[in-house]
Amino acid sequence: MKVYPQLTTSHKSKYTPAQWRSIFSKRGISVNRINRLAENVAAISRKDELLNYFGKRSMNEDFLIIDDDKSLNALPDYLRQRVIQPSGSVGLTGVLADEALSLLGKDSHEMV
C-alpha cells in the first residue's frame, strides 16, 4: 500500500496544492499529494473540523497535523500523537520539522 502524507491547515485556501508543493520543495520536503479540508463555512472549532475529517477516512494512511491551534490538545490520542504544534508567531522550526519527519519515518533534514 502506498501512503501519502496529508496536509491539513487553516491556511488551506491561501495557496493552491501546486503552491503548497513549491513551499515544501523550497524547504527540501518532497510532497506528492496534498489533500485539503473543505472550507469551514460552519465556523466549527479546528478540533471538531479535524475530528469530522478523520472520522470519514480510514486510519491506515500516514498523516501528520501541523497546527498551532491549542484546541488540538483535546484531540483523542490516536490523532494527538500525530500533531506537531508550532508557535503561531514563530512557525515551523528545524527542531519541529525533524520531529515531523521522524513521525513520518523519514530522516532528519536541516531546514534552509
Image: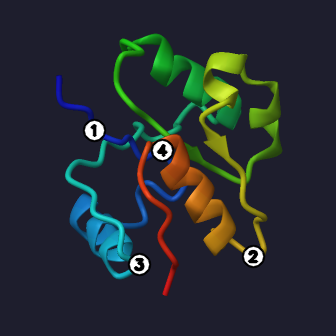
The image quadrant that residue 45 belongs to is top right
Mark closer to the observer (1, 4) = 1
Label 1 – label 2 distance at C-alpha: 27 Å
- Classify mark 1: residues with Cα within 10 Å, few (<14), some (14-19) or many (20+): some
Residue lying at 53% horizontally and 18% vertically, measured from the top left: 52
Position of residue 26 in the picture relative to residue 73 (left or right):
left
Position of residue 105 in the picture relative to residue 40 (left or right):
left
**Picture coordinates of residue 109 (x, y %)?**
47, 70
**3 or 4: tag closer to the N-terminus:** 4
Q: Which residue is mark 2?
A: 90
Q: Which residue is mark 1?
A: 4
Q: Secondary structure at mark 3?
A: loop
Mark closer to the observer (2, 3) = 3
Residue lying at 28% horizontally and 66% vertically, measured from the top left: 21
**Picture coordinates of residue 24 (x, y %)?**
37, 70
Tell me the amino acid under the disc marked 1. Answer: Tyr
Q: Which residue is mark 4?
A: 8
**Picture coordinates of residue 89 (x, y %)?**
78, 74
Tell me the amino acid under the disc marked 2. Answer: Val
**Quadrant of the drawing holding the N terminus:** top left
As drawn, the label of residue 16 is none
**Contact, CB < 8 Å: mark 2 with mark 3?**
no
**Contact, CB < 8 Å: mark 3 with mark 4?**
no
Label 1 – label 4 distance at C-alpha: 13 Å
Q: Which residue is mark 3?
A: 27
**2 or 3: tag closer to the N-terminus:** 3
Tell me the amino acid under the disc marked 3. Answer: Arg
Tell me the amino acid under the disc marked 4. Answer: Thr
Label 3 – label 4 distance at C-alpha: 18 Å
**2 or 4: tag closer to the N-terminus:** 4
Mark closer to the observer (1, 2) = 1
The image quadrant that residue 48 belongs to is top right
